[in-house]
Amino acid sequence: MPRPQGRIMVAQNRKARHDYHIGDRFEAGLVLTGTEVKSLRQGRASLADAFATVDDGEVWLRNAHIPEYAFGTWTNHAARRTRKLLLHRKEIAKLARETEGSGRTIVPLAIYFSDGYAKVEIAVATGKKAWDKRQTIAERDAQRDTQRELASRNRRA
């Protein structure tokens, strides 16, 4: 059976874009067990509380929830286990440098399959303040109102 081509989205972390200023993005491979892959192929995953850390020159995805595979037996995995991320050495060094300072963290933005391989998109992020969040919401509402007004004006013409 041929491997599926393209990018198949499994899960997105929409809350991360709301809670953080997103900086540099990286695509990383995931080290998974067989039942985790099967569960992901069913589209079951959550990145709501997930984050990544750099420990001893390795990047680890923590607190990501991939539920147990329904037809798994004694080989099933733990739903919130720590998973290793696969990155180049230079990328790991850059992540370590950028997160050394306070207020910066590594957040996962999405889990997807790219040409049949499970990947996670991670980003270096800085937390937003409450006023930043309100400002983002106000800008989004203003943009929506502008688009709505343009659409109604175009319909009349």
Image: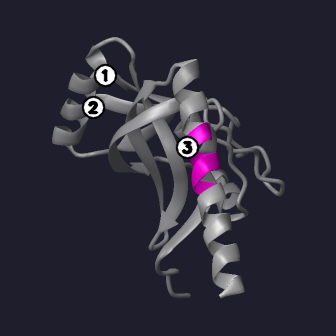
Disc 2 designates what residue? 95
Q: In this orientation, which residue lies closer to the viewer: 77 or 21?
A: 21
Q: Which residue is drawn at the image coordinates 61% and 45% (left, top)?
A: 14
Q: Is residue 57 visible?
A: no
The residue pinned by badge 3 equals 139
Q: Which mark is residue 99?
A: 1
Choose mark 3 or mark 1, whichever is in front. Answer: 3
Task: Please say whether residue 142 is one of the residues in the magenta stretch.
Answer: yes
Disc 2 + disc 1, Cβ < 8 Å: yes
Task: Identify the element where label 1 is drawn.
Answer: helix
Residue at the left extreme?
90
Looking at the rendered structure, the kind of residue marked 3 is Glu
Asked if 2 appears above or below 107 in the picture, the reply is below
| Left or right, 58 with reference to 32 | left
Q: Position of residue 51 (x, y in %)?
A: 51, 30
Amino acid type, residue under disc 2 in the picture: Leu
Q: Are marks 3 and 2 in contact (CB under 8 Å)?
A: no
Q: CA distance from mark 3 to mark 1?
A: 29 Å
Range covered by the magenta-colored residues: 138-144
> Which sits in the foreground, 86 or 10?
10
At horizontal 62% and vertical 39% (from top left) the residue drawn is: 137
